[in-house]
Image (cartoon, rainbow, N blue to C red):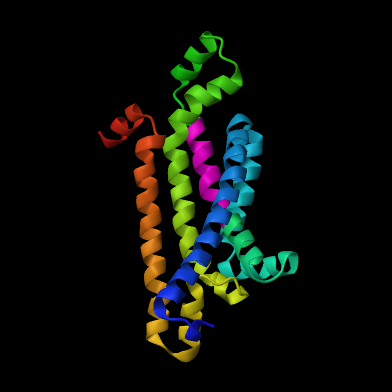
Amino acid sequence: QIETLNLSQRLRKTTLEHLRLVGLSLLSAILIAVPFGILAARHRVLAQVVLGVSGVIQTIPAFALLALMIPLVGLGGPAAISALFLYSLLPIVRNTYTGLTDTPSHLRESALALGLPPMKRLRWIELPIASRAILAGIKTSAVINVGFATLGAFVGAGGYGQPILTGIRLANTGLILEGAIPAALLALAAQWFFEWSERFLVPAGLRLKSTD
């Protein structure tokens, strides 16, 4: 199918496939990892389990993790998205945990003195302070996923890995670059996007502090 489409059509197709793989896996990881990071910060015993399990997953080679997903969810997009989701967990969980546990003790004591309940302390004090660290974890996962998603072509998930895989089989450098260059540009774009988003999601005082 790749050979029957012109370059712009192929790029559009592979870009949409790649964005789908990265977007769905990253969104799922955020929805799961941030709450687990919060729980880990609240319960130190649970932190060892959560960080340990997510750390072990991160050590599994990419191809092995993809292969493990095939018997569970089948070939194609589900296998790649599941593997990308698992790979995304550690940076987000770890940074959420670190950001919350690094909240200055005097701020927590002030919140307690004001009588704020735990959920309000989390929402109005702890999460805003931890937002920079959490966003950094999400950015790391996004950049990792953009690269890892190219391997999804080996399980029939498409994306930028498809022209790379076809180019390797045919010894065609042009096809390899057709997947490799957009993947590299997308990784840079993802990094820039999250750095830009920091202006709106991180409180101004924390941004100024981080640049001092």
Q: Residue at x 45, y 18 (%)?
A: 107
Q: Residue at x 37, y 84 (%)?
A: 174
Q: Main secondary structure of the magenta part?
A: helix
Please state if 41 lies on the left or on the right of 144 as rendered. Answer: right
Q: Nearer the viewer, residue 149 or 61?
A: 149
Q: Position of residue 85 (x, y in %)?
A: 59, 55
Instruction: Look at the image and say whether residue 98 sits in the magenta stretch.
Output: yes
Residue at the outermost bottom position: 170
Instruction: Look at the image and say whether residue 124 sits in the magenta stretch.
Output: no
Above or below for 146 versus 5? above
Q: Position of residue 134 (x, y in %)?
A: 47, 40
Q: Position of residue 31 (x, y in %)?
A: 60, 43
Above or below for 62 versus 190? below
Q: Residue at x 43, y 44 (%)?
A: 136
How many badges with numbers are in the image? 0
Magenta range is: 87-100
